[in-house]
């Protein structure tokens, strides 16, 4: 049987049936022993619990990736901040070099201006005949002493001229050199500042990515916690439901024992089926789920799917698989609208068939039905996710594979 989302109803699987026991003389101790053996096995987990389990698995896969992204983003933040700090230091150093070079340039510019002034004076003197005048002054001396004095004076003037020229040339070279240094320092400072700004922007982007990754991680953790809480809640609910199912199973077993005893006492033990007898296909449809053991990933246990699911449209007719008495007809929890037919003895064992999830039940308890008689309509009541018939065959109350009793073509 399939599980209905939001409906946390689980069915006992093993050797308990919501049909009659194999032998009316079977006592309660036998039933209790079978319940104890199968108490941990549930036929199916609810759709919600399965969904929570799937989400847990997905989140467990996603969390390491999110953690890695957050760690990488934090590393990028640290690297970008270090780069920004280094660029800022480089910018500050370049700024200091630029300021020093600017000061040297100012000093050199002052020297150039002074040299130009001095040179201008000498040029003016020379232009006014300064060299000839100096020569006439020396030659026209009154005596040796005056001659020597004038000659010394002329020599000093010549030295001052040379110093002025040399100073101007040196100042010009210094100014040019300092100008080059200043330009290089300024460009280096500008580049360092630009690099610092770019590094800071990169650090901010990396920080944003880290924060986004951290938020994603927090959201994943929160969702995982919610999924865990939901799964645990579903587990608790389903275990409570299972206890209800056990009690319902006990009630059904008691009802069937009483019914079989009454039939025997009244002299109506039921027909005897011949060896090799085949059942009628109870509904026109296709097999959607097999009989057999299944592994439940939620409870980590193997469970028996005690019947065969036959998918069919809602309202499709359901027919009695063989002659028999209606042992049970009514609502039975996860089975929904449920009918069980007792077909009598087969090779010394009591045989019954059960029909679950019907939209309508068209027979009554105790009624005799014939093979092929309309007994109900296909539906999706109880623990079901869609229109289908859950069909069971039981011998002495123990489920057996219905396909062993049905036509090979399931038609």
Image (cartoon, helix red, strand yellow):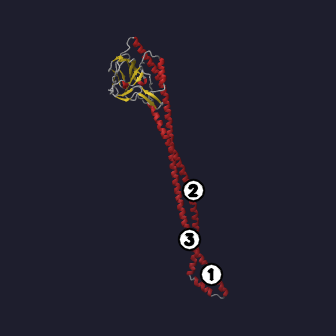
The image position of residue 41, as x and y in percent, is: 47, 27
Dot 3 crowding, Cα within 10 Å, few <14, some 14–19, many 20+: some
Q: Is residue 329 left or right of residue 233?
A: left
173 vs 306: above or below: below
The residue singled out by tag 3 in the image is 173
Who is closer to the viewer here, 97 or 398? 398
The residue singled out by tag 2 in the image is 89
Q: Which type of secondary structure does the marked residue at label 2 adopt?
A: helix
The reply to whether dot 2 and dot 1 touch (C-beta < 8 Å) is no
Q: Is residue 119 visible?
A: yes
The image position of residue 292, as x and y in percent, is: 41, 28
Circle nearer the N terminus (2, 3): 2
Circle nearer the N terminus (2, 1): 2
The reply to whether dot 2 and dot 3 touch (C-beta < 8 Å) is no
The residue singled out by tag 1 in the image is 155
C-alpha span from label 2 to label 1: 55 Å
Q: Number of marks in the image?
A: 3
User: Which is closer to the viewer, label 3 or label 1?
Assistant: 3
Q: Which type of secondary structure does the marked residue at label 1 adopt?
A: helix
């Amino acid at each position: 049987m399939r599980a209905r989302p939001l409906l946390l109803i689980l069915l006992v699987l093993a050797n308990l049936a919501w049909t009659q026991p194999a032998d009316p003389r079977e006592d309660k101790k036998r039933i209790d022993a079978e319940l104890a053996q199968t108490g941990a096995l549930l036929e199916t987990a609810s759709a919600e619990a399965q969904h929570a389990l799937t989400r847990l698995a997905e989140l467990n896969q996603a969390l390491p990736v999110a953690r890695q992204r957050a760690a990488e983003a934090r590393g990028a933040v640290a690297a970008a901040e270090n780069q920004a700090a280094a660029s800022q230091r480089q910018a500050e150093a370049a700024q200091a070099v630029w300021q020093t070079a600017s000061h040297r340039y100012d000093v050199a510019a002052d020297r150039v201006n002074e040299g130009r002034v001095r040179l201008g004076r000498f040029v003016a003197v020379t232009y006014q005949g300064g060299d000839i005048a100096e020569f006439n002054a020396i030659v026209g001396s009154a005596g040796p002493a005056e001659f020597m004095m004038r000659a010394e004076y002329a020599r000093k003037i010549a030295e001052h001229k040379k110093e002025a020229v040399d100073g101007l040339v040196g100042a010009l070279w210094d100014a040019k050199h300092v100008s080059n240094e200043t330009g290089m320092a300024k460009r280096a400072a500008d580049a360092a500042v630009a690099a610092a700004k770019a590094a800071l922007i990169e650090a901010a982007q990396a920080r944003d990515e880290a924060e986004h990754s951290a938020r994603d991680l927090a959201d994943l953790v929160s969702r995982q916690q919610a999924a865990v809480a939901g799964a645990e809640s579903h587990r608790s609910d389903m275990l409570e439901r299972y206890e209800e199912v056990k009690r319902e199973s006990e009630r059904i077993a008691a009802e069937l024992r009483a019914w079989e005893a009454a039939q025997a006492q009244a002299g109506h033990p039921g027909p005897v089926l011949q060896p090799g007898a085949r059942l009628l296909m109870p509904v026109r449809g296709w097999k959607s789920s097999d009989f057999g053991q299944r592994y439940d990933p939620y409870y980590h246990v193997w469970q028996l799917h005690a019947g065969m699911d036959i998918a069919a449209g809602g309202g499709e007719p359901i027919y009695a698989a063989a002659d028999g008495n209606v042992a049970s007809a009514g609502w039975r929890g996860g089975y929904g609208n449920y009918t069980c037919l007792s077909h009598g003895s087969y090779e010394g064992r009591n045989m019954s068939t059960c029909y679950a999830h019907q939209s309508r039940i068209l027979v009554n308890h105790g009624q005799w039905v014939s093979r092929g008689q309309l007994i109900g309509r296909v539906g999706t009541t109880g623990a079901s996710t869609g229109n289908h018939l859950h069909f069971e065959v039981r011998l002495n109350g123990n489920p057996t594979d219905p396909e062993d009793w049905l036509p090979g073509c399931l038609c």
